[in-house]
């Protein structure tokens, strides 16, 4: 059992404070959805957790089982058990996925036996044609194929915690179901079960992923936390009530969206 703990996280991009005090705690086997309007800082949160250059941490702490991640280079965060699927997966010409996975597993002291077989099995589960597995990382893949590919890497690497940044974007309904089912299975398996932060705009991912907790991020802060029913409510009401008011507050006093 592991714990990913984010405390008082503040971060700036290009000199502007985007995350303004984020607190979030995820345990092995839990799925937390982070929803919120465009520009609220969701991707920034993902990048800051993983240590993308250019994002300046102003305050706070991010730990896995007590090990501080902030300040560590990306590869050490990965070795500590953190994995990120990108909202916009990058193409890496000349580098096959199998090679990336083999090196990553080796670096983390993981098992590399029958890697091709495991990739093929995951590929079948995720609807990725075997031919695509030999391509250089994400090169000439469709948006949906890239997202399936990200999920395959997640499944083979078996991290402790995964941050999914809009894994659902660009996926059709069938692909969405396959990808979400695979993540859901990882969060139910043992040794230890995967802890998930699923960033998304849409409830449709969550109907398969079954989050335990739903958070609303607005203007760089978590302004509301609830159960799965919160996702349905957001789908009905939208995020209008969660945008900043002229006085700088969000929604009304108890953090609920203002009545329109
Ligand atoms: P979300 O993922 O919730 O839509 P982002 O985290 O991508 O939001 O962006 C939050 C804010 O930070 C936006 O106003 C965006 O323009 C700004 N931002 C994000 N990344 C950068 C960057 N690299 N340079 C400048 N501004 C950025
Ligand atoms: Mg984003």
Image (cartoon, rainbow, N blue to C red):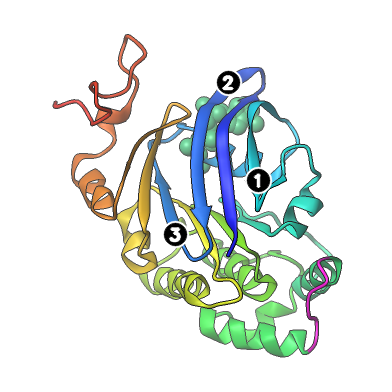
Question: CA gap, disc 1 to disc 2?
Answer: 21 Å
Disc 3 within 8 angstroms of ligand 2 (CB): no
Is 111 included in the stretch rendered in magenta? yes
Q: For the residues marked 2 and 3, what is the alpha-carbon distance in whole angstroms?
A: 27 Å
Question: Looking at this view, is 170 or 13 the one in front?
Answer: 13
* Vertical placement of residue 211 versus 106, above or below: above
**Quadrant in the rendering for residue 208:** bottom left
Q: Which mark is residue 17?
A: 2
Left or right: 78 in relation to 146: right
Left or right: 231 in relation to 40? left
**Which of the pair 142/70 is nearer the observer?**
70
Does residue 165 appear anywhere in the picture? no
The circle drawn on residue 31 is 3
- Magenta region: which residues? 108-113
Instruction: Give the label on residue 63, or none.
Output: 1
**Marks 3,1: beta carbons within 8 A:** no
């Amino acid at each position: 059992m592991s714990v990913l703990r984010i405390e008082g996280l503040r971060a700036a991009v290009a000199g502007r404070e985007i995350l303004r005090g984020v607190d979030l705690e995820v345990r092995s086997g839990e799925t937390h959805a982070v929803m919120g309007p465009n520009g609220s800082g969701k991707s920034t949160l993902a990048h800051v957790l993983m240590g993308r250059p250019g994002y300046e941490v102003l305050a706070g702490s991010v730990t896995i089982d007590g090990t501080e991640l902030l300040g560590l280079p990306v590869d050490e965060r990965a070795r500590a058990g953190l994995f990120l699927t990108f909202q916009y997966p990058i193409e890496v010409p000349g580098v096959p996925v199998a090679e990336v996975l083999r090196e990553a597993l080796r670096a983390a002291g993981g098992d590399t036996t029958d890697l091709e077989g495991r990739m093929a099995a995951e590929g079948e589960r995720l609807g990725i044609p075997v031919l695509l597995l030999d391509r250089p990382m994400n090169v000439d893949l469709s948006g949906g194929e890239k997202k399936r590919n990200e999920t395959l890497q997640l499944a083979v690497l078996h991290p402790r915690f995964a941050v999914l940044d809009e894994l659902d974007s660009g996926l059709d309904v069938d692909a969405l179901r396959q990808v979400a089912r695979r993540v859901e299975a990882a969060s139910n398996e043992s040794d230890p079960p995967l802890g998930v932060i699923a960033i998304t705009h849409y409830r449709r991912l969550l109907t398969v992923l079954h989050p335990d907790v739903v958070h609303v991020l607005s203007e760089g802060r978590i302004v509301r936390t609830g159960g799965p029913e919160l996702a349905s409510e957001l789908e009905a009401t939208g995020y209008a009530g969660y945008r900043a008011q002229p006085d700088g507050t969000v929604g009304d006093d108890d953090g609920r969206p203002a009545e329109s």
